[in-house]
Structure formats: C-alpha cells, structure tokens
Amino acid sequence: MLVETAPGQGTAQVKLEGRDPSGAWKLLTRAPETFDAPPSPTLRSDTARELRRRGIGYLLCFQNEAVTLDLRSHPDLYGIREVAHNQDARLYQLP
C-alpha cells in the first residue's frame, strides 16, 4: 500500500492499520517505511479533475496566495482556463 503526502510530512506520527477477515482493526506497523519521491507528472491535472468530480467548477485565487503563482505558470498542466481577473484575484474554470 502506498500513501502519498505533501512534502515536509516526514515527522508526522503514522501507524498503519487494516481490517482482518472478521472486520476487526489490527495494527500492521507502527513505523511504515517512508521515502521521498518526485511528484507524479499528472498530479496537477489529477487534482483539478478531482475537484471537478466533487462538484467544484471554479477556483478564485488571490495574488498573495502561494498556489496562485503555480496556477498562473502552469494552467496547461492543471487543464484550467482563466475566465476573469482584476488587480488582486483571478478566476479559473476547472476542466
């Protein structure tokens, strides 16, 4: 089993549990193996599609938000389209 997390989560205390055939929870390991890996090349488009699947059609981002620079720099990778903007905000339509 693979669980992906955001960078910098290596200090999080994680234990891995699973259900046995009777449905009872059992501890599988208190110290799962961790490693750093490059993000999936489809992470941005997968994220945009998941938001859309959950009924979110637009993102309103403000200039001072960290994600705004990435959205503006890589709209093609997200599959998003800017539909409006003003001095401080941009509105993006999800695929």
Image (cartoon, rainbow, N blue to C red):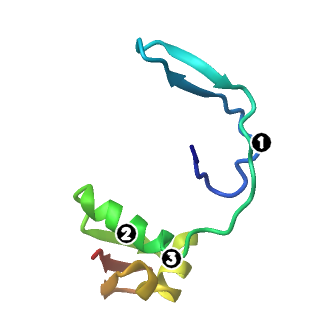
The amino acid beneath tag 3 is Thr
Q: Position of residue 38 (x, y in %)?
A: 67, 69
Lower sequence index among marks 2 and 3: 2
Q: How far apart are marks 2 and 3 (CA)?
A: 14 Å
Q: Which residue is drawn at 58% across and 48% down?
A: 2
Question: Residue 50's image quarter?
Answer: bottom left
Q: Closer to the camera: disc 2 or disc 3?
A: 2
Residue type beneath disc 2 = Ala
- Of the image marks 2 and 1, the number of the one nearer the N terminus: 1
Which quarter shows the N terminus? top right
For the residue carrying disc 2, how many other residues have a C-alpha within 10 Å: few (<14), some (14-19), or many (20+)?
many
Foreground disc of the pair 1, 3: 1
Alpha carbon of mark 1 to alpha carbon of mark 3: how far? Answer: 27 Å
Query: Residue 48, relative to residue 79: is it above or below?
Result: above
Disc 1 target residue:
11
Crowding at dot 3, Cα within 10 Å, few <14 / some 14-19 / many 20+, comes out as some
